[in-house]
């Protein structure tokens, strides 16, 4: 059954549309060549035909290898059991996001794909954790989705930093809604970084939360997000997921060679400091022939300090997706603006910013999307992608970006009592240990 489903996903989502597009392009090129230069077309076609015993087996082997990797990977995923954990918060949390950064550090687990045999033949992949915040008609809840194998690790990391919370297994809220376009309206998008991954977002350290100020003086960057999500009404829901997996500093191909995330960070630092990447000395020379240290503004110095601090942290590949779904008669377009805006407090004009991408569909004229078919197709895809938690692999494979534990803890931590939103799902009382002098 899992194998059949994997083949269906390959055919529907990956193989045939891409393959058909490439074949169409090739046919168009050959047709144009035939019309404009028939003699050249005959010569090229003759060469291709003579050499087919060489290129055809190689081409088929390449296609087989690509499909095989997709097949075994999806087959592997279908065999994994997953669990959705809900984190119920107490009335008071006095810890800074540094505690959540420690949780993310504990989840920096890279096992599962140590060898090429594991990755290619078996289809294994390093685990993905999905950190989720959902507003169900205004009730804001925190979830973590993980493979069942990692459940105890996740719970241990959370309880080590937040012993007063409750972690329970929850039903998947995404499966409690029947997505019927005749009854529901939906808008969703992925989010990506505007600048290079080397530039961090505005973090809790920039907000001064690393110094543990008193609750009344805290400025929690998550507060606007929670307040907005808590303001939804009946028939409305907003879902936000942050999918993470360990970044292994893998090399990414470019026109000028290959580079990893750490290399990109160091390249940005060298560029800002105008220094040679090998010698680390200034590129520019003074009239006397000595390296001339560039004069940096306070803002440039702060930018370099933030980038350098980012390099000292553990890194994850990240994908962020958000959805606003509501009954058709309850759907409010202003909440689309609100969903896009939930990342604004993490943006920095001098560092990095989030922008929505991929699933957005905007048309200026009605004939650009006949009867809304393209919009409906996009809505189904973003809903299905969210529910599958599919980002790093097919059927909704997307290029991830890199964030460190400090950035992730800024975007996903358990807010304290200074966040007054009454609809946050909290436990009724704080847990405490029993008195030691109770009679036995």
Image (spheres, grey):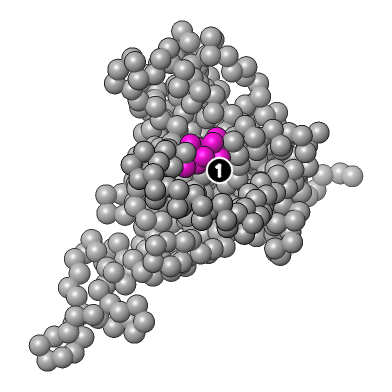
Q: Nearer the viewer, residue 305 or 76?
A: 76
Is 27 on the left-hand or right-hand side of 156? left
Does residue 423 appear anywhere in the picture? no
**Quadrant of the image occupied by residue 133:** top right
Q: Is residue 61 magenta?
A: no
Q: Mark 1 sits on what residue? A: 397
Residues packed near mark 1 inside 10 Å, few (<14), some (14 to 19) or many (20 plus): few
Q: Nearer the viewer, residue 144 or 195?
A: 195
Task: Please tell me whether mark 1 sits on a helix, a strand or a loop.
Answer: loop
Q: Quadrant of the N terminus?
A: top right
The magenta region covers 17-26
Is 232 placed above or below 49 here? above
Q: Quadrant of the C terminus?
A: top right
Q: What secondary structure do most residues of the magenta stretch adopt? A: helix
Is 356 placed above or below 333 here? below
Outermost residue on the right side: it is 440
Is 184 placed above or below 342 here? above
**Quadrant of the image occupied by residue 294:** bottom left
Taking the spot 24% from the left edge, 64% from the top edge, the residue there is 300
Q: Nearer the viewer, residue 206 or 255?
A: 255
């Amino acid at each position: 059954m899992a194998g059949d489903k994997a083949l269906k996903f390959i055919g529907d989502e990956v193989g045939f549309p891409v393959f058909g597009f490439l074949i169409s392009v090739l046919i168009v090129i050959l047709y144009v060549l035939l019309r404009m230069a028939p003699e050249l077309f005959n010569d090229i076609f003759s060469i291709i035909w003579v050499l087919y015993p060489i290129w055809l087996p190689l081409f088929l082997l390449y296609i087989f290898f690509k499909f095989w990797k997709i097949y075994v990977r999806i087959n592997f995923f279908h065999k994994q059991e997953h669990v959705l954990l809900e984190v119920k918060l107490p009335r008071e949390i006095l810890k800074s996001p540094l505690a959540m950064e420690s949780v993310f550090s504990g989840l920096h687990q890279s096992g599962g794909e140590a060898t090429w045999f594991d990755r290619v033949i078996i289809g294994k992949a390093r685990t993905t954790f999905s950190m989720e915040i959902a507003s169900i008609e205004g009730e804001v809840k925190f979830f973590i989705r993980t493979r069942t194998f990692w459940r105890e690790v996740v719970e241990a990391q959370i309880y080590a930093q937040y012993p007063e919370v409750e972690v329970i297994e929850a039903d998947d809220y995404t499966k409690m809604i029947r997505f019927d376009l005749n009854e529901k309206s939906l808008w969703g998008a992925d989010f990506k970084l505007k600048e290079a991954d080397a530039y961090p977002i505005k973090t809790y350290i920039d907000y001064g939360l690393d110094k543990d100020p008193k609750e009344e003086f805290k400025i929690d960057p998550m507060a606007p997000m929670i307040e907005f999500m808590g303001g939804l009404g009946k028939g409305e829901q907003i879902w936000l997921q942050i999918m993470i997996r360990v970044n292994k500093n893998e090399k990414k191909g470019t026109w000028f060679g290959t580079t990893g995330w750490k290399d990109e960070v160091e390249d940005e630092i060298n560029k800002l400091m105008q220094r040679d990447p090998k010698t680390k000395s200034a590129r520019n020379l003074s009239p006397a022939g000595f390296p001339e240290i560039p004069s940096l503004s306070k803002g440039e110095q702060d930018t370099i300090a933030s980038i350098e601090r980012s390099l000292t942290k553990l890194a994850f590949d990240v994908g962020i997706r958000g959805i606003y779904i509501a009954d058709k008669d309850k759907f409010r377009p202003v909440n689309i603006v609100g969903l896009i805006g939930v990342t604004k407090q993490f943006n920095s004009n001098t560092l990095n910013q989030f922008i929505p991408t991929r699933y957005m569909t905007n048309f200026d004229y009605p004939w650009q999307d006949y009867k809304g078919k393209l919009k409906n197709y996009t809505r189904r895809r973003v809903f299905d992608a969210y529910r599958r938690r599919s980002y790093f692999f097919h059927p909704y494979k997307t290029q991830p970006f890199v964030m460190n534990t400090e950035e992730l803890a800024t975007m996903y931590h358990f807010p304290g009592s200074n966040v007054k939103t009454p609809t946050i799902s909290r436990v009724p009382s704080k847990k405490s240990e029993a008195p030691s002098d109770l009679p036995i």
